[in-house]
């Protein structure tokens, strides 16, 4: 059996890229591969000890000669150390900067032919890629990788346009684990948040300006005029005080609940009748996929990878960025029709299972690993350990 030894580097704290990287590592380990996480802290989704999974902490020495602790150099050094000690086959890094660049440095230090697979998740292109001082560095990380993947067609397009990248980029959508994300029975909890005749709208994010949480409040206010409803806001971030003030000014305090950060996202999402995702930018929209897997449709904005995930008029509705009037109309249309809600919910479940299944996406990554290593892909029944 051709088991691989894979080093994974990602942002281990909250964020879609860290979630995907960690869940992918766990799935690869389940299939018998040896996975080594190389990060500054344990990925928050890693959980308890698991077979075939190892964690290597990156420690930064704060020498007085450095104005700022050199994390990038410490990471590159640790990656090289782990690769040599564990005889890794490849690095799979999530984000071009700094991780792909660190993998390039580690490869140079090792002086061998260890392979590097880089997954682009969005911010490294949509935000950092707009900075002229960083473009050459990001381009280096991408072009020096042995394979590059991106989580949506739109992100591939933007990468080519912003950085003038011509090399092949593999499309590998984010995925959902149906053992974790499925419709939960929350009937014993729902009464704590809404009365039986009220609908529950939900928004989950890190409350940054790009998420347009203010639009969420505007949409909810319009919906609540037509349909008795409640809004649950999940997460924290820099825009939270501003959103709290807006809700107070609009007199909606008794209709809105702030739930803070939550670990049991599947259970929380299952409380909702509808998810709101009116983001300015969203390279994929992982939270919408998690909602979809729980049978909850989404009202989203026409941006990034959201239209690749949400099928307009089937698993949710799409409207132009900032068009809260149209988004509210779609929400009212859907929530006013119980039969439509049921149809959308069923379509969400089928789409999440068919198009964004953990097994098929994990296999896509495996195919890429074996391709860059120049090895044959083992048959499925010989991969499981």
Image (spheres, rainbow, N blue to C red):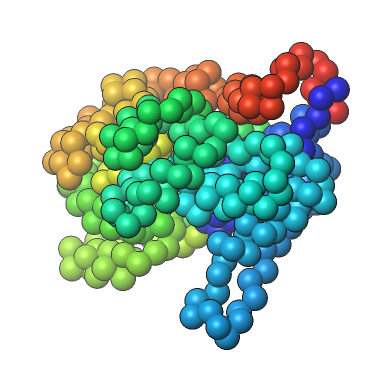
Does residue 45 sit above or below 307 in this rendering?
below
For residue 297, which quarter of the picture?
top left
Indicate the quadrant containing the N terminus: top left, top right, bottom left or bottom right.
top right
Q: Position of residue 197 (x, y in %)?
A: 35, 42
- Left or right: 215, with 25 as reference point: left
At 67% across and 69% down in the image, what residue appears?
59
Q: Is residue 311 visible?
A: yes
Q: Position of residue 174 (x, y in %)?
A: 51, 33
169 or 14: which is nearer to us? Answer: 169
341 or 290: which is nearer to us? Answer: 290
Q: Position of residue 65 (x, y in %)?
A: 55, 83
Does residue 46 sit above or below 307 in this rendering?
below
- Left or right: 107, with 217 as reference point: right
Indicate the quadrant containing the C terminus: top left, top right, bottom left or bottom right.
top right
At 67% across and 59% down in the image, what residue appears?
77
At 42% across and 47% down in the image, what residue appears?
138
């Amino acid at each position: 059996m051709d088991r691989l030894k894979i080093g994974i580097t990602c942002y281990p704290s909250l964020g879609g890229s860290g979630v995907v990287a960690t869940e992918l590592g766990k799935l690869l380990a389940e299939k018998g591969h040896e996975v080594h996480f190389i990060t500054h802290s344990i990925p928050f989704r890693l959980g308890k000890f698991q077979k075939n999974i190892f964690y290597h902490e990156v420690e930064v020495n704060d020498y007085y000669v450095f104005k700022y602790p050199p994390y990038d150099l410490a990471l590159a050094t640790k990656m090289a150390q782990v690769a040599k000690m564990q005889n890794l086959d490849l690095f799979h890094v999530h984000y071009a900067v700094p991780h792909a660049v660190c993998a390039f440095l580690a490869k140079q230090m090792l002086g061998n032919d260890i392979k590097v697979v880089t997954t682009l998740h969005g911010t490294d292109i949509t935000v950092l890629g707009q900075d002229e001082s960083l473009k050459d560095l990001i381009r280096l990380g991408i072009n020096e990788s042995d394979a590059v993947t991106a989580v949506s067609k739109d992100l591939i397009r933007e990468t080519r346009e912003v950085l003038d990248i011509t090399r092949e980029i593999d499309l590998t959508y984010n995925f959902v684990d149906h053992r974790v994300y499925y419709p939960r029975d929350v009937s014993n909890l729902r009464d704590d948040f809404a009365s039986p005749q009220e609908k529950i709208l939900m928004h989950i994010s890190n409350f940054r300006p790009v998420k347009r949480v203010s639009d969420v409040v505007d949409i909810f206010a319009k919906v609540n005029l037509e349909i008795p409803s409640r809004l649950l806001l999940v997460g924290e971030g820099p825009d939270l005080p501003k959103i709290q003030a807006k809700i107070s000014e609009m007199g909606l305090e008794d209709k809105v609940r702030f739930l803070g950060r939550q670990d049991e996202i599947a259970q929380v999402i299952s409380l909702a009748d509808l998810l709101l995702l009116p983001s300015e930018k969203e390279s994929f929209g992982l939270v919408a996929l998690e909602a979809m897997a729980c049978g909850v449709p989404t009202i989203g904005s026409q941006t990034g990878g959201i239209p690749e995930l949400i099928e307009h008029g089937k698993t949710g509705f799409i409207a132009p960025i900032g068009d809260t009037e149209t988004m509210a109309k779609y929400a009212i249309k859907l929530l006013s029709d119980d039969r439509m809600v049921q149809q959308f919910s069923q379509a969400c479940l089928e789409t999440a299972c068919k198009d964004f299944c953990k097994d098929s996406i994990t296999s896509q990554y495996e195919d890429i690993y074996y391709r860059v290593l120049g090895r044959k892909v083992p048959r499925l029944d010989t991969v499981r350990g």
